[in-house]
C-alpha cells in the first residue's frame, strides 16, 4: 500500500518509476478523504494544489532532476504561512486569512519538489498539550480515537501516525513536536534553535520556537530536516550553519556516553513509561552504551520559568492581531472598540490567559521580579546542560511522563496539562536539539516515547545516535489499528 511506505521508500519507488508522483498524491488525498473524519488531523486539504505540485514533481523526475524528496507528500502545521492557502493557527482571529507568501520552510519543501497535501490542526497559536485548544475541531490519536494525540502539533503527528502523510512539519516551543510524536508512536525532532528558519512561522515564543519534522523513521526525519534547514537571511536568528546532514552508513553506539538526569527519571512518571524506558536503557547498555546518572537541579524550575518567558513573548507577538491587519474584524466603537471586540471574540480562553500572564510579567515593577528572574534561571539551566555535554554525547529521558490520555480527561486541569512538558521544556530553554522516538507500549497498547537531547549544533550527532537507538529498539515499531 502506497500510504504506509516511508518517505525514503516512496522516494526510491518514484525514482525507479515504480510509482508516479500523481499516483502517490492521489493515494494520500483519497485516504484523507475517506478516513480523516476519524482523526481530524487536517484543517484544510488542498487537493488541487497537491495535484498540480505532483505534476511538477513528476516532470522533475522525468528530467532526472529530482532530489531525495521530490514527489513525496507533506502536511504542514497551520501556523506556518502558505502562499494562497488559508493559514489560521486554529484561531478564529485568523479565520479566512490567506498569506501572500510562503514560510521559508514551505518554500524549501516546494523547491525540493515536495507535494503539500494540506494544513494540520493545532492548539490555538500552538498553546497547549492536547490539540483540544483548537477553535475548530478535535484531533484524535490514531492508536485510540478516544484519546488525545498530544499537542500542540497534534494534527501533524496524527497525520503521520494515521498514514495520512508520510512526513509533516510541526513547531516546538516547549515540546509541541516531541510530545505528540511520543503519544502517537512516531519520530519527532526539534532541531537546534536557529538551524531552521522561523520566517513565516506565526510566532508564539520567539526565543523558544523551532520548526521540525515528524516522520515514521529517523532516516525520514533527517531527510526532511536537511531539506528545511540552513541559513536564511530573512530570519535574524538563523544561524550561519550548513543544512543538517547526518551520516547513517556507520552508526555505532558502542562507547557512547549517555547521561540519565535523575530529575527527569522521577517517580512522577507513569509506571509503564518508566518500565519501557528502563527496558530501552538495558537494551542500549547491551550494545555498549555507557550510562551514568547525573543531576541537573535547575530542571525542576523548567515549567515555572517557561510559563513566564513563553507568555511574555506571546503577549508581545500576539499584539499584531487587532482586526485591522489580518483576519476578520468585529464591530466596535472607534479604533479601541474595534480592537477590543476583535480580540475578545477572536481569541480563545487559553490564548487570552497567556496574554494576560505575559503582560503582567512584563509590566513595570513586575519585570524584575518575574521576567528577569526567569531569564536568570534559564541561563543557569543552560550552564548546567553545557557542563553535562562536556562529558556526555546525549541525555536520555522519557519524552512524556504519561501515554496518551483521554480527550477531555485533563482539559479541566490546566496545571496537570502544563506539567506534561516537564521533560521537553529544557531543550527549548537551552536551544538544544531533541528527538523523540518510540521505545515500547504501555499495558493498554499505547506508545511510550523516549527522548534524546544533544548539545546545541550537534544535530547530526544526535540524529546518528537516534538512528542507532531505533535499530536496537526495532521491536518497538508497530502500526496503530488504522481505519
Ligand atoms: N505545551 C506547551 C505550551 O502549552 C508547549 C507548546 C508548544 O511547544 N508549542 O505552551
Image (tube, grey):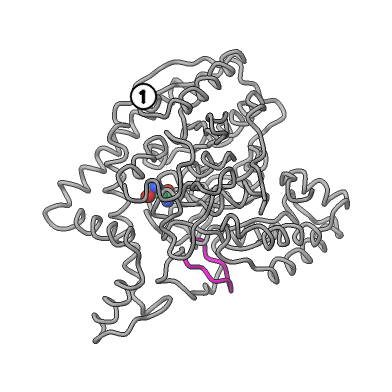
Say if residue 456 shows up in the picture.
yes
**Main secondary-structure element of the magenta-colored stretch:** loop
- Residue 78: x and y in percent read 52, 62
Q: Is residue 212 above or below residue 92?
A: above
Q: Is residue 9 above or below residue 75?
A: above
Residue in the picture at 40% in, 24% down: 265
- Residue 356: x and y in percent read 24, 60
Q: How many marks?
A: 1
Front-lying residue, 56 or 9: 9
- Residue 436: x and y in percent read 53, 36
Front-lying residue, 331 or 224: 331
Question: Any magenta on residue 83?
Answer: yes
Position of 370 with respect to 46 (left or right) is left
Question: Any magenta on residue 62?
Answer: no
| Range of magenta residues | 79-88
Say if residue 208 shows up in the picture.
no
Decide if ligand 1 comes within 8 Å of the CB at mark 1: no
Q: Quadrant location of residue 135? A: bottom left
Residue in the picture at 72% in, 51% down: 69
Circle 1 residue: 267
Q: Secondary structure at mark 1?
A: loop
Q: Quadrant location of residue 426? A: top left
Q: Is residue 463 above or below residue 55?
A: above
- Residue 166: x and y in percent read 68, 49
Residue in the picture at 63% in, 25% down: 473
Q: How dense is the environment of label 1, judged by Cα within 10 Å: few (below 14), some, or many (20 and up)?
A: few
Amino acid at each position: 500500500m502506497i500510504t504506509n511506505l516511508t518517505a525514503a521508500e516512496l522516494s526510491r519507488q518514484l525514482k525507479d518509476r515504480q510509482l508516479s508522483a500523481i499516483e502517490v498524491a492521489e493515494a494520500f488525498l483519497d485516504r484523507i478523504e475517506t478516513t480523516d473524519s476519524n482523526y481530524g488531523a487536517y484543517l484544510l486539504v488542498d487537493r488541487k494544489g497537491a495535484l498540480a505540485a505532483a505534476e511538477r514533481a513528476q516532470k522533475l523526475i522525468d528530467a532526472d532532476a529530482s532530489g531525495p524528496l521530490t514527489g513525496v507528500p507533506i502536511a504542514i502545521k497551520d501556523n506556518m504561512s502558505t502562499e494562497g492557502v488559508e493559514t489560521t493557527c486554529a484561531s478564529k482571529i485568523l479565520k479566512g486569512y490567506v498569506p501572500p507568501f510562503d514560510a521559508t520552510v514551505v518554500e524549501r519543501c516546494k523547491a525540493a519538489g515536495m507535494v503539500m497535501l494540506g494544513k494540520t490542526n493545532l492548539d490555538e497559536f500552538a498553546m497547549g498539550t492536547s490539540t483540544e485548544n483548537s477553535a475548530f475541531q478535535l484531533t484524535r490519536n490514531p492508536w485510540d480515537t478516544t484519546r488525545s494525540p498530544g499537542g500542540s502539533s497534534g494534527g501533524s503527528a496524527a497525520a503521520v501516525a494515521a498514514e495520512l502523510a508520510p512526513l509533516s512539519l510541526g513547531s516546538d516551543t516547549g515540546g509541541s513536536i516531541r510530545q505528540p510524536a511520543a503519544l502517537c508512536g512516531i519520530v519527532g525532532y526539534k532541531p537546534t534553535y536557529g538551524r531552521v528558519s522561523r520566517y513565516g512561522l506565526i510566532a508564539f515564543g520567539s526565543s523558544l520556537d523551532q520548526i521540525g519534522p515528524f516522520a515514521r523513521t529517523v532516516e525520514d526525519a533527517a531527510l526532511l530536516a536537511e531539506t528545511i534547514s540552513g541559513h536564511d537571511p530573512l530570519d535574524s536568528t538563523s544561524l550561519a550553519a550548513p543544512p543538517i546532514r547526518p551520516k547513517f552508513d556507520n552508526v555505532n553506539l558502542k562507547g557512547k556516553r549517555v547521561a540519565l538526569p535523575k530529575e527527569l527519571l522521577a517517580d512522577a512518571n507513569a509506571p509503564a513509561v518508566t518500565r519501557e524506558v528502563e527496558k530501552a536503557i538495558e537494551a542500549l547498555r547491551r550494545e555498549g552504551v555507557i550510562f551514568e546518572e547525573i543531576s541537573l537541579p535547575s530542571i525542576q524550575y523548567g515549567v515555572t520559568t517557561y510559563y513566564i518567558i513563553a507568555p511574555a513573548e506571546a503577549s508581545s507577538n500576539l499584539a499584531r492581531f487587532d482586526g485591522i491587519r489580518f483576519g476578520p474584524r468585529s464591530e466596535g466603537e472607534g479604533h479601541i472598540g474595534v480592537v477590543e471586540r476583535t480580540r475578545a471574540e477572536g481569541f480563545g480562553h487559553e490564548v487570552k490567559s497567556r496574554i494576560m500572564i505575559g503582560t503582567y510579567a512584563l509590566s513595570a515593577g513586575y519585570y524584575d521580579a518575574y521576567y528577569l528572574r526567569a531569564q536568570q534561571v534559564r541561563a543557569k539551566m543552560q550552564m548546567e546542560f553545557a557542563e553535562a555535554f562536556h562529558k556526555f554525547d546525549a541525555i536520555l529521558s522519557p519524552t512524556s511522563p504519561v501515554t496518551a490520555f483521554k480527550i477531555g480527561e485533563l482539559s479541566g486541569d490546566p496545571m496537570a496539562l502544563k506539567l506534561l512538558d516537564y521533560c521537553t521544556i529544557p531543550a527549548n530553554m537551552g536551544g538544544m536539539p531533541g528527538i523523540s522516538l518510540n521505545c515500547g507500549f504501555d499495558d493498554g497498547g499505547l506508545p511510550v516515547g523516549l527522548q534524546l537531547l544533544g548539545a546545541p549544533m550537534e544535530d547530526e550527532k544526535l540524529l546518528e545516535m537516534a538512528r542507532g537507538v531505533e535499530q536496537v529498539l526495532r521491536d518497538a515499531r508497530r502500526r496503530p489499528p488504522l481505519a
